[in-house]
Image (cartoon, rainbow, N blue to C red):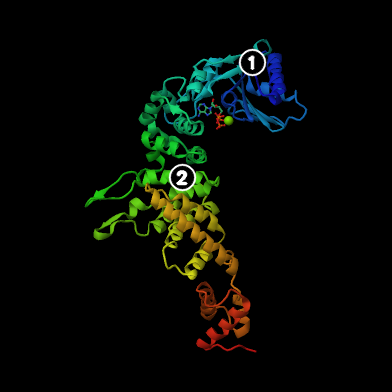
Amino acid sequence: MNFPPEHQNYLTQIGLAGKQLGYPTYVVGGYVRDLFLQRPCKDIDVVCVGSGIELAKQAAKMFENASTVSIFHHFGTAMFKVNDLEFEFVGARKESYRSDSRKPSVENGTLEDDQIRRDFTINALAISLSPHDYGTLIDSFEGIKDLNNGIIRTPTDANITFSDDPLRMLRAIRFATQLNFKLHPDTYNAIKTNRERLKIISAERIHTELNKIIMTPVPSVGFKLLFDTGLLHQFFPELSAMQGIEERNGIQHKDNFYHTIKVLDNIAQTTNNLWLRWAAIMHDIAKPLTKRFEGSLGWTFHNHEMVGAKVAAQVFKRLKLPLGDELKFVQKMVALHQRPMMLTKENITDSAVRRILFEVGEDIESLMTLCQADMTSKQEWRVKKYREDYEYLKERMTAIEASDQLRNWQPPISGEIIMETFGIKPGRPVGIIKDAIREAILDGIIPNNYQAAYQLMLQKALEIDLTPIK
Ligand code: ATP
Ligand code: MG
């Protein structure tokens, strides 16, 4: 196998360092997989039959601009960086597991011991770096065959592999989604069998894999696998609960799980913003909680957007996703996701458009992107109509924004000006005047400028018996 020319020198030198120590040395894992798939990869894992830490030290000496070697005695690993490459070294090892932890006990082993402990056959490929057989592929578990056939399969009994380290179940689905591969039936069934083992995995590791699935070009592939294997139910029951269609009096509602992952696929085509993709996942999350059948109205989901914003917080908390601006953004998108569509109805006033620009502020583009992704009707004419209405709304927004600049709205008259003008302290009257000015601007009664707002302030003050002090 040929390495990329820009990696050649590093890999040759590492092989020589291994020879100096008497260690057979290999490049292994994701790097080899990505080499065959022609995906760029800058993390290079090296395994040797010997001490990974010693090899790292020896290899780092070969390169002038290598970073200092970081050593992790506890794991028996060491790493350094050279330019944009990151090399990680480990001695070949054999692992055994206990049932309550994904941390194995470890002893030295052969290359094959090391390959078999890896998660998937496509991640267990090794290429020798030792001078005497440099470049030779060691494919002990038919990894190349699986690569060519697009199959995710474990090197050894899938039930044991997943029970040992349940995180691998999520990795299997993540790789299937990223690479557009299929799960081998044994792998698929073992995930089903071992799904409850996921409970020993930390929320951080779960969300890291989940985010990788979310960031793929067609994330629904992963979500369908998560659902069908029952893994989704373990860590995201709010989402799995959305699956299913109920019928009453001959009236059905749509399947909100499949709708949601379709919306996610749609939005994945227009944004790489992880949190906007999360907003797509959450936008209808409270539909199961708010679902009612109301006679002539049929199925309703009153207030699902507000309840959904609350559910989003619970999910983020449980999955240990960031609870700051990221969550706030997702909640805002969920809470407001219905609004743009409501504004496409006929007879919508400029003031209604102004109000949404005012409320959403700088996130208006994101909200419109979500809203567009949310159009998933199976009826062509309906989607077409939605699109046209939506384009028209966008034009109106642009026009109103251009004249009124509401996006980062600052009141033209501040509380300080009000207090100074009337010689009053902070209190109710200040709020009354500020609200009146804001409402008048949003309703289009006065323009968004100082002059007009000042006049309105004086007028409003009269109504509540305030007089200017000068
Ligand atoms: P990516 O970098 O895209 O996440 P990767 O396959 O390189 O993919 P890493 O987490 O970087 O994944 O791990 C490097 C290699 O270590 C893998 O290719 C695999 O051989 C092995 N590995 C990683 N995690 C596990 C695990 N949980 N169980 C078994 N082997 C693993
Ligand atoms: Mg990697």
Q: Which residue is mark 1?
A: 135
- The answer for how far apart the CA atoms under marks 2 and 1 are is 42 Å
Q: Quadrant of residue 234?
A: top left
Task: For ligand 1, give the image quadrant.
Answer: top right
Residue 13 is situated, as x and y percent measured from the top left of the image, at 72, 20
Query: Mark 2: which amino acid?
Result: Leu
Query: Mark 1: which amino acid?
Result: Gly
Q: Is residue 33 visible?
A: yes
Whether residue 421 sits left or right of residue 120 in the image: it is: right
Secondary structure beneath dot 1 equals loop
Q: Is residue 58 visible?
A: no
302 or 262: nearer the viewer = 262
Residue 45 is situated, as x and y percent measured from the top left of the image, at 61, 25
The correct choice, above or below, for 343 with respect to 376 in the image is below
Q: Which residue is mark 2?
A: 264
166 or 293: nearer the viewer = 293
Q: Residue at x 73, y 29 (%)?
A: 66
Depth check, mark 2 against mark 1: the one in front is 2
Residue 304 is situated, as x and y percent measured from the top left of the image, at 38, 56
Whether residue 31 sits left or right of residue 100 in the image: it is: right
Quadrant of the image containing the N terminus: top right
Residue 264 is situated, as x and y percent measured from the top left of the image, at 46, 45
Indicate which disc, 2 or 1, sits on the residue closer to the N terminus: 1
